[in-house]
């Protein structure tokens, strides 16, 4: 759906007119924790406080965003820029965390966040965004698919810390 598509049935009111996308700030922590807790079923305050602190401390570029609807935080996106990671020489943006208040789902909040994220990244000459999702998080996978994300030919590997080398875990 194109930006500016009339969803309300009223002339002049467009999909993103009510959504203000801005840089995240320290005052957003409580709302981020509330949204995340609705989505995950548990409080990850310490983790999110650290993620927000890291996002705000990176003075090179602000890529972490908040979306407001009716003067309240309705969603957030935390990202990072990497300039050559895991043996790849080209810069890439990482979409680390995204969350939309369940009461605002379907209102274009996530799409507005991603649109602004892409706009900011184009300004820095970046051409790719990468993210990860659980294989069975169908809602997130559908959202990412509609946003143009596709699987890439890379393999993420994982090993238990306490398993000795040469002995596969059962």
Image (tube, rainbow, N blue to C red):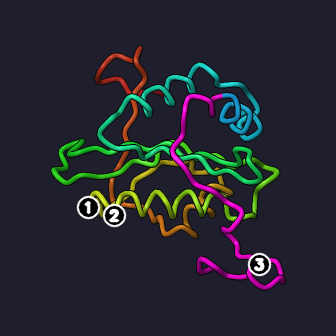
Q: Main secondary structure of the magenta part?
A: loop
Mark 2–mark 1 Cα distance, whole angstroms, equals 5 Å
Query: What segment is highlighted magenta in the picture?
Result: 1-29
Do the numbered discs 2 and 1 sit on residues whose CB atoms are within 8 Å? Answer: yes
Mark 2–mark 3 Cα distance, whole angstroms, equals 28 Å
Mark seen at residue 125: 1
Quadrant in which the N terminus is drawn: bottom right
Q: Give the residue pinned by disc 3.
A: 7
Q: Residue 86: percent from the left, percent from the top?
A: 23, 42
Q: Total label count? A: 3
* 157 sits to left or right of 2: left
Query: What residue is drawn where x is 73% and y is 27%?
Result: 42
Q: Residue 30: percent from the left, percent from the top?
A: 69, 28
* 47 sits to left or right of 162: right
From this view, report whether residue 102 is shown above or below residue 165.
below
Q: Give the residue pinned by disc 2.
A: 122
Q: Disc 2 or 3, which lies upstream in sequence? A: 3
- The question of residue 62 being in magenta is answered with no
Q: Residue 18: percent from the left, percent from the top?
A: 71, 63
Query: What secondary structure is marked by label 2?
Result: helix
- The question of residue 5 being in magenta is answered with yes
């Amino acid at each position: 759906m194109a930006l500016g598509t009339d969803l309300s049935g009223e002339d002049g009111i467009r999909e993103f007119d009510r959504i203000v996308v801005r840089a995240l700030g320290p005052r957003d922590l409580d709302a981020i924790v509330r949204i995340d807790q609705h989505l995950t079923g548990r409080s990850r305050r310490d983790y999110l406080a650290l993620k927000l602190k890291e996002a705000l401390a990176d003075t090179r570029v602000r890529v972490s965003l908040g979306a407001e609807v009716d003067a309240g935080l309705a969603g957030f996106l935390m990202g990072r820029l990497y300039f050559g990671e895991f043996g790849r020489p080209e810069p890439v943006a990482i979409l680390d965390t995204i969350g939309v208040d369940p009461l605002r789902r379907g209102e274009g909040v996530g799409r507005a966040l991603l649109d602004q994220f892409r706009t900011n990244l184009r300004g820095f000459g970046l051409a790719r965004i990468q993210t990860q999702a659980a294989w069975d998080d169908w809602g997130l996978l559908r959202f990412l698919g509609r946003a143009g994300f596709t699987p890439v030919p890379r393999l993420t590997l994982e090993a238990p810390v306490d398993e000795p080398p040469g002995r596969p875990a059962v």
